[in-house]
């Protein structure tokens, strides 16, 4: 029913107000099928910081239809919310929908929160990814000389940043990029999904990352980082789709993640040859816990090969590797310099592996021909204990560098069940030294068994790392629920 507003002039004032209200409510009822009504729901989540201000991407013109480009909406939202850095911080809520976007930057004291039904779709248009300079510790891009496409979600020189949600999804739509890589059509290095640089107090948690063009999560030159509850999925033959790559980072915790990758599930790095040596920023104080990895052509945890700034005090425990090339692999080469030392691994369960232990001193690849051939890496104090593996092709391939052996290797309480078609030489060892105890099958002569009388477990530190003292709070936000 419609009421011309002119008819209301003949009705007393109070009745006109009441009737007008009825007209408005009736109108809303008539369009109910065209305009959804909503209610508010409170969502709790865990974070290093809660926020005083919240906004939705739709407040800035975002349209989650999977085809509308939302790059400007994300950039405008973050720019607007950055004004609250000193006023309790802010959160950008990404509601349910498919949000096509190019690269956008984060700000400090900020949370990016993805609804459980939110999907960030990475644009496949190179123009949506500005080209930035190579990392100074690398000297060039990983795919090409020169610059690199900025990551989809990017931040630099920030503090107190949270990227989280209800296991919402970031989809890199990587097939186009993989094809360009295979066809030699890349002008610059492919973008990553998430990269945070020169930043402190970072949390990345409760997300699903799929089909990254290249690396998935790359904190670099950062400190105090928690990466938790991440699911990462990529085709097992996709190129360089590393899961999580802490790079020249201090005080990091990676835990409770499930990763299926075309490359290393976790790759610990610190710069490449002379550029990494000159930059001189190691990765150290790294805890890796409760990780499940599937990667038929790569490692569960790789140390290197870009390790020229040094890698020290890495503690990995409660790891599951399934149909994966190796458990923990150390990769380095002449010209790298740097060091990998004080590495502690325990509680690893493996099923269908090519190698259990793998160390490589001739990995090879260099950024250019200006590396120092006298820059030899130091590999020492490497500890493995309490490990079980089945259906293994080769127990170990441990190859140091002639004149620069890998030393202080300790392996204890390890049972390896060889595959029916395993290699006849279970252990292949050159240019290494160390000890073993309680290892089956018997290790190579360069790792002599200590015997039951002198056997003791390989080291694993009992003191906690500083990152374990980083407090997590229970935060809440309000989101619209549409009927």
Image (cartoon, grey):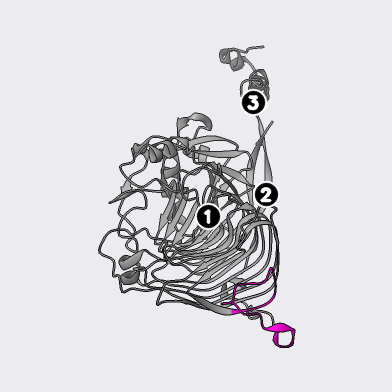
Q: Quadrant of residue 269?
A: bottom left
Asked whether the residues under the numbered discs 2 and 3 touch, taking CB atoms below 8 Å apart as contact, a structural biologist would say no
Asked whether the residues under the numbered discs 1 and 2 touch, taking CB atoms below 8 Å apart as contact, a structural biologist would say no
Q: Which residues are magenta?
A: 435-455
- Magenta-drawn stretch contains 442: yes
Q: Quadrant of residue 56?
A: top right
Residue 113 at what x, y percent from top left? Answer: 57, 48
Which residue is found at the position 58% from the left and 43% from the top? 169
Above or below for 455 versus 208:
below
Please name the residue that numbered disc 3 is placed on: 17
Distance CA(mark 1)–CA(mark 2)? 34 Å
Q: Can I make out residue 254 in this image? A: no
Q: Can I make out residue 301 in this image? A: yes
Residue 472 at what x, y percent from top left? Answer: 63, 65
Marker disc for residue 45: none
Which residue is found at the position 54% from the left and 50% from the top? 297
Please name the residue that numbered disc 2 is placed on: 43
Distance CA(mark 1)–CA(mark 3)? 68 Å
Q: Quadrant of residue 33?
A: top right
């Amino acid at each position: 029913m419609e009421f011309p507003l002119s008819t209301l002039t003949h009705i007393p004032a109070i009745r006109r107000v009441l009737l007008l209200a009825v007209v408005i409510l009736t109108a809303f009822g008539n369009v109910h099928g065209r305009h959804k009504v909503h209610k508010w729901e409170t969502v709790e989540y865990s974070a290093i910081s809660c926020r005083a201000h919240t906004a939705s991407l739709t407040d800035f013109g975002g349209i989650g239809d999977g085809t509308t480009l939302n790059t400007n909406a994300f950039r405008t939202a973050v720019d607007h919310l950055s004004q609250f850095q000193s006023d309790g911080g802010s959160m950008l809520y990404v509601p349910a929908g498919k949000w096509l976007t190019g690269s956008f930057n984060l700000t400090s004291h900020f949370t990016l929160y993805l609804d459980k039904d939110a999907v960030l779709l990475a644009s496949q248009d190179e123009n949506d990814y500005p080209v930035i300079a190579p990392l100074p510790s690398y000297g060039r891009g990983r795919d090409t000389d020169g610059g690199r496409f900025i990551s989809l979600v990017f931040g630099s020189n920030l503090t107190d940043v949270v990227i989280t949600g209800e296991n919402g999804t970031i989809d890199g739509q990587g097939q186009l990029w993989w094809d360009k890589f295979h066809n030699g059509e890349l002008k610059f290095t492919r973008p990553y999904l998430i990269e945070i640089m020169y930043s402190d107090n970072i949390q990345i948690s409760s997300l699903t990352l799929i089909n990254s063009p290249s690396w998935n999560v790359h904190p670099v030159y950062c400190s105090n980082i928690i990466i938790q509850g991440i699911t990462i999925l990529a085709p097992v033959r996709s190129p360089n789709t590393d899961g999580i790559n802490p790079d020249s980072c201090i005080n990091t915790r990676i835990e409770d993640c499930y990763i299926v990758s075309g490359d290393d599930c976790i790759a610990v790095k610190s710069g490449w040859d002379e550029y990494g040596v000159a930059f001189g920023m190691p990765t150290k104080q790294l805890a890796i816990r409760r990780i499940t990895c599937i990667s038929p052509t790569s490692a569960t945890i790789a140390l290197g090969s870009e390790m020229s700034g040094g890698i020290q005090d890495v503690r990995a425990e409660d790891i599951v590797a399934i149909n994966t090339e190796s458990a923990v692999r150390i990769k380095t080469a002449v010209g790298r310099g740097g060091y990998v030392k004080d590495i502690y691994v325990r509680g690893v369960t493996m099923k269908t592996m090519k190698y259990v232990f793998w160390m490589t001193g001739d990995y090879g690849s260099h950024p250019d021909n200006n590396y120092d051939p006298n820059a030899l890496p130091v590999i020492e104090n490497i500890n493995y204990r309490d490990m079980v593996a089945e259906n293994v092709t080769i127990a170990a391939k441990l190859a140091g560098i002639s004149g620069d052996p890998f030393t202080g290797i300790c392996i204890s309480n390890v049972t390896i069940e060889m595959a029916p078609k395993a290699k006849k030489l279970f252990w292949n060892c050159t240019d290494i030294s160390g000890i073993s105890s309680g290892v089956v099958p018997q290790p190579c002569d360069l790792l002599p068994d200590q015997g039951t009388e002198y056997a003791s477990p390989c080291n694993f530190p009992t003191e906690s790392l500083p990152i374990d003292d980083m407090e997590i709070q229970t935060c809440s936000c309000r989101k619209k629920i549409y009927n």
